[in-house]
Image (tube, rainbow, N blue to C red):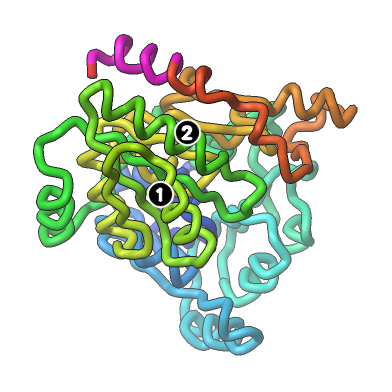
Amino acid sequence: MSLNLDKAESLCLLRLSAIGDVCHAVAMVQAIQRRYPQLSITWVIGKVEYQLLRDLPQVEFIIFDKSQGWRSYFQLRSQLKHRKFDVLLHMQVALRATLASLAISAKIRLGFDRKRAKEGQWLVTNRRIEAQKTPHVLEGFMGFAKAIGVNSLNPSWNIPIPNQDRAFAKERIGKDKVLVICPAASKAERNWLADRYAAIADYAVSQGFKVCICGGPSLLEKNLAQEIEFLAKVSVDNFVGQTSLTQLLSLLNEATLVLAPDTGPAHMAVTQGTPVIGLYAHSNPKRTGPYLYLNYVISAYDKAINMQQLDPNIWGTRAKGENLMEMISVAEVKDTMDRLIGDLAL
């Protein structure tokens, strides 16, 4: 039976990371705001993730900076020592989140169902959401909204983009049809091959698109982007490491379509209604794929699971290996790109 928060005044959300996950969480937060406009919402969030969401309407943010080590827990406790919330949504299964939750005082402490409440989460919560057999991460988060009486669970997003960041993107993209390639995931093994990205860049230009490469400032991302730029026969704009998160969000907003592996910018693009072609081999795209565009995911995941004789019935199982992304061909991506362009009349 779901809770009713019509008489509640305050809600605290604990979700520290990562970029893709906090994008999913925004849809849940805004579903809650539509149902309970009286609720004061406080979000305990990671330092990097805050940079993307800091202008979210009617949400107070408290930053948990994990780089501070143990001091981050004491800082959080100090910030919250005189506060008590009606409800805590404990939405992260990680030991650091379990420890962080001890600084949050709340009458109702809602966590995942027993099977998913790992890393000690079940010890610091007193209510659970419904068990779900095969949820996408976003659907798992929406389980929290459902548990507190929200019935309208279709996701939508309103992540404000500062005017100067919109101007930044418009100046760099112009009015052309644009393919934005976000080639790098957090782990190198999840990246597609540079020469294949370059081949798609060449193909996109032949179809009337301008091509931009986007990503963060890490050496891995910069090196991959430079290799793609070198191998492409056409001119591409390389913005890797040159944008803030909100500038990147604006570029994704202006894009016609996005090509990316299992990485945060793919989910950022979804929040902007920009179609995404996702490239997956290590994780199940039915669980972590770009939510509104799962029909355009190219996946070698099932093949990888079968090759490694892993149990496909264990939801969330990851395939391991450095070369799994090689199973995704250039031809598959071209065909999917053509299908998406036709389906959406891009």
Where's residue 202, x and y in %? 35, 31
Q: Is residue 78 left or right of residue 206?
A: right
Where's residue 178, x and y in %? 24, 35
Question: Which residue: 46% across, 43% down?
Answer: 24
Q: How many marks?
A: 2
Please name the residue that numbered disc 2 is placed on: 290
Label 1 residue SS: helix
Q: Is residue 20 left or right of residue 255?
A: right
- Amino acid under disc 2: Pro
Magenta portion: prevailing SS class = helix
Task: Name the front one of labels 2 and 1.
Answer: 1
> For the magenta stretch, what is the residue range?
335-345
First of labels 2, 1 by sequence position? 1
Q: Quadrant of the N terminus?
A: top right
**Label 2 environment density (alpha carbons within 10 Å; few <14, some 14–19, many ≥20):** many
Where's residue 304, x and y in %? 76, 29
Q: Where residue 83 is drawn, which disc sits there?
A: none
Where's residue 96, x and y in %? 67, 70
**Label 1 environment density (alpha carbons within 10 Å; few <14, some 14–19, many ≥20):** some
Asked if the magenta segment contains residue 169, the reply would be no
Please name the residue that numbered disc 1 is placed on: 230
Label 2 residue SS: loop
Q: Is residue 309 left or right of residue 175?
A: right
- Amino acid under disc 1: Phe
Front-most of 102 and 73?
A: 73
Front-most of 89 and 87?
A: 89
Question: Which residue: 84% across, 26% down?
Answer: 307
Location of residue 154 (image quadrant): top left
Question: Which residue: 26% across, 21% down?
Answer: 207
